Amino acid sequence: MATNPVRLCRHAIALSLMALFAFSLPLLRAQDREVSDTSFKFSTVDNNLLDEVNEFDRQLDKKGLVFHDPSVEQYVAKIGNKLIANQPRLEHVEFRFRILRDPMVNAFALPNGSIYVTTGILGVLENESQLASVLGHEATHVTNRHTYLENRSIRKKVLAINILQGVAGAMPGGTVFGAAVALGAGMSAVIVNGSIYGYSREKESEADQRGFELLRRASYDPRAMPRTFELLDERLEFEPIETFYRTHPKLEERRQIATARLAGLNVMDTRTGTESDFLEHVAPAIRANVELDLSSRRARTAVSRASRLTKWKPDEPKYQVLLGDAYRSLGAKDAEPTDDERGRHGQAEHRKLYFKMTEQEEQAQLLAKPSGIATRNTNLDKAEKLYLGAIEADPRLADAHRGLGFLYEQQSKPMDAAREYRTYLTLTSGTSLDRLRIERRLAGVEKALLPRASTEQ
């Protein structure tokens, strides 16, 4: 889905301010903290929001933003249903656990029971218990009617929100991040606010505590929750939109509280699940996310995620190609950020660079230094070895030949690039957009060969 980056960023800024505004709200009264189905009475306002939410759900699917792979979908649904197995049935709630095509590290729940985890967050987590900790948190937002309560609160502050939106600026730049944000921005503000920046501080704490209890009741390892917060704090490169799951200092505070809850608990009979088993179920989503990372100028993250897959299955050609694409996209950039780049100042500088320069301009700046040239050569050498290794394992793997074609063209080797492009076209059929793109690239490198052929004659 094509998104309007200016509109996306404008809403992101406005909603971040709204989140700060929400955190200053008075705490809920004790009797309002747990919301049962009998105590919550739907009003016209609530029904209107439900209609918008149901339409939002339909549009996510219609726009192709929902990741559909039976094995991944069944796995996520199995975990989610285990967590809510003993929950009472709620009015206007049908639990569905879904995956969103989005490299943003995020998860969110809609009040109709649809719970989404992004491909980005699946690429970070290590095992089933950690995924359960995320799903348990989100399920609590549904069972305790947090979206409806937040919407009622926000409606009373329309004037303040309009002022915040009025001062929100626009930033240039394009990204595939936050496709759901862009879609939801045309609907209720509470949908976007809750799915990206979280609810009031007390509601989020409530969701963490209840999620922790759901983990234990489903016999998952409760130690997964503090470990999940550590993983979500990973900083390979900045994200254009900071979500509730990545915001400082909340992650550290949440980790400390979750760790304190472990005191005195017996976790001997709990289920964690191995990383290998987890990858066996979610690898297709992580693979898709690497491609999304590459289209979002996040080559470092793509290298990290693809390396994880190749380490898991080192002889799998398709993962070798994926890692080759990631190293090729790195160009003159180091695969690992420095300590300074991981810090808040370094992240801010990277953000400025991202919006100030195109990817080509950023690479040109890096290549102006000898270190950049050396890094580029190292990355391209790694990419070439990965592509050749994949071809050795499977000579008919078209994507490996396509990757080599891109690499040789990048290295100003038109003859080698043309050979690989021709092989790719021989191995593929039909009239796909990708085939058309390679045909155009082949025509371009063949044109570059003409002066050389004339000289040789």
Image: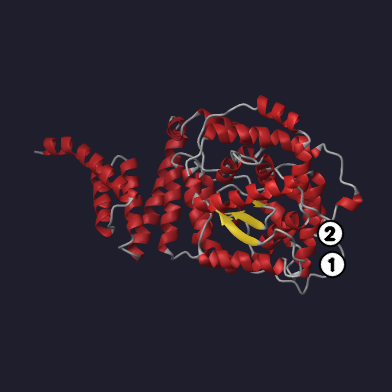
The structure residue drawn at horizontal position 8% and vertical position 38%, both measured from the top left corner, is 457
The secondary element bearing badge 2 is classed as: helix
Residue 308 position (above or below residue 63): below
x then y, percent, for residue 412: 30, 39
The structure residue drawn at horizontal position 87% and vertical position 51%, both measured from the top left corner, is 32
x then y, percent, for residue 59: 54, 49
Render colour scheme: secondary structure
Question: Do the numbered discs 2 and 1 sit on residues whose CB atoms are within 8 Å?
Answer: yes
Residue 347 position (above or below residue 1): above
Q: Is residue 212 visible?
A: yes
Decide if residue 10 is on the left or right side of residue 260.
left
The secondary element bearing badge 1 is classed as: loop
- Give the residue furthest to the right: 30
Q: Is residue 307 visible?
A: no
The structure residue drawn at horizontal position 86% and vertical position 40%, both measured from the top left corner, is 26
Residue type, label 2: Arg
x then y, percent, for residue 133: 71, 60
Q: What residue sits right under mark 1 in the picture?
A: 265
- Give the residue furthest to the bottom: 269
Alpha carbon distance from label 2 to label 1? 8 Å
Residue type, label 1: Leu
Nearer-the-camera pick, 192 or 75: 192
The structure residue drawn at horizontal position 66% and vertical position 45%, both measured from the top left corner, is 191
The quarter of the picture where residue 321 lies is bottom left
Q: How many marks?
A: 2
Decide if residue 338 is on the left or right side of residue 445.
right
Q: What residue sits right under mark 2 in the picture?
A: 261
- Give the residue furthest to the left: 457
- Give the residue furthest to the top: 167
x then y, percent, for residue 13: 65, 33
Nearer-the-camera pick, 17 or 129: 17
